[in-house]
Image: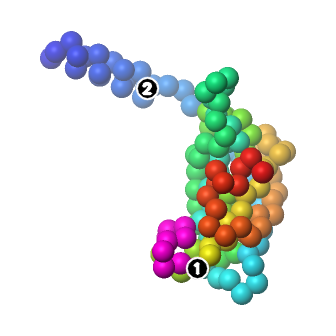
Amino acid sequence: MSARRWLTLAVLAGCINEDVRLYEVELTGEVVAPAGTTGRVFLELHHASRGSGALETPLGRFDATELDAPGPTTWTTLVPIDDGEGLVLYGWLDVDGDGTLCSLAAGPEPAGIVELGKFPAHALTFTLTLETPCAGPSALYPP
């Protein structure tokens, strides 16, 4: 085996054996959509920021889920606590059922974001209001 392959294998093995510290969080809350709108709700959890100094960036997605419709929900997730700071919940309503935020065929699909300021805590509550048409998480955060 060539030296280059050994080096690649060593680097990959080093990454595989890296410890990841996870923090369990139960999110309980409600997703509120404009009256008369229906569809699946796509939710994403992000760190509020990742990196440090000149390399610090807002948002870092690490988990996602879907709901059949807006309303009350509970979601238990594992947060990789060494990958970023803070916790942000983003969501949008798939009005036309195509799984794509604001495709050409879609009408305005409402989105929203909320910072979960009491993190770290094992139980967090939220109200996520979907009211901004066709906005991805980076367009809404920081608020």
In this figure, which residue is indicated by the disc labeled 2? 15
Q: How many marks on residues?
A: 2
Q: Looking at the picture, tell me which residue is in the foreground, 74 or 131.
A: 131
Q: Tell me which residue sits at (16%, 15%) in the image.
A: 2
Drawn side of residue 8 relative to residue 114, left or right: left
Of the two numbered discs 1 and 2 on the same chain, state the one appearing first in sequence.
Answer: 2
Give the percent coordinates (x, y) of residue 110.
67, 71
Give the percent coordinates (x, y) of residue 131.
74, 70
Label 2, residues with CA under 10 Å away: few <14, some 14-19, many ≥20: few
User: Helix, strand or loop at disc 2?
Assistant: helix
**Residue type at the position of mark 1:** Gly
Q: Tell me which residue sits at (75%, 79%) in the image.
A: 34
**Residue type at the position of mark 2:** Cys
Q: Is residue 79 visible?
A: no
Label 1, residues with CA under 10 Å away: few <14, some 14-19, many ≥20: some
Splitting the image into 4 quarters, where does residue 50 fall?
Answer: top right
> Disc 1, disc 2: CB below 8 Å?
no
Magenta region, residue range: 99-107
Q: Is residue 13 above or below residue 71?
A: above
In this figure, which residue is indicated by the disc labeled 1? 107
Q: CA distance from mark 1 to mark 2?
A: 43 Å
Residue 104 drawn in magenta: yes
Splitting the image into 4 quarters, where does residue 118 fall?
Answer: top right
- Please identify the quadrant where the N terminus is shown: top left
Q: Nearer the viewer, mark 1 or mark 2?
A: 1
> Outermost residue toward the top?
3
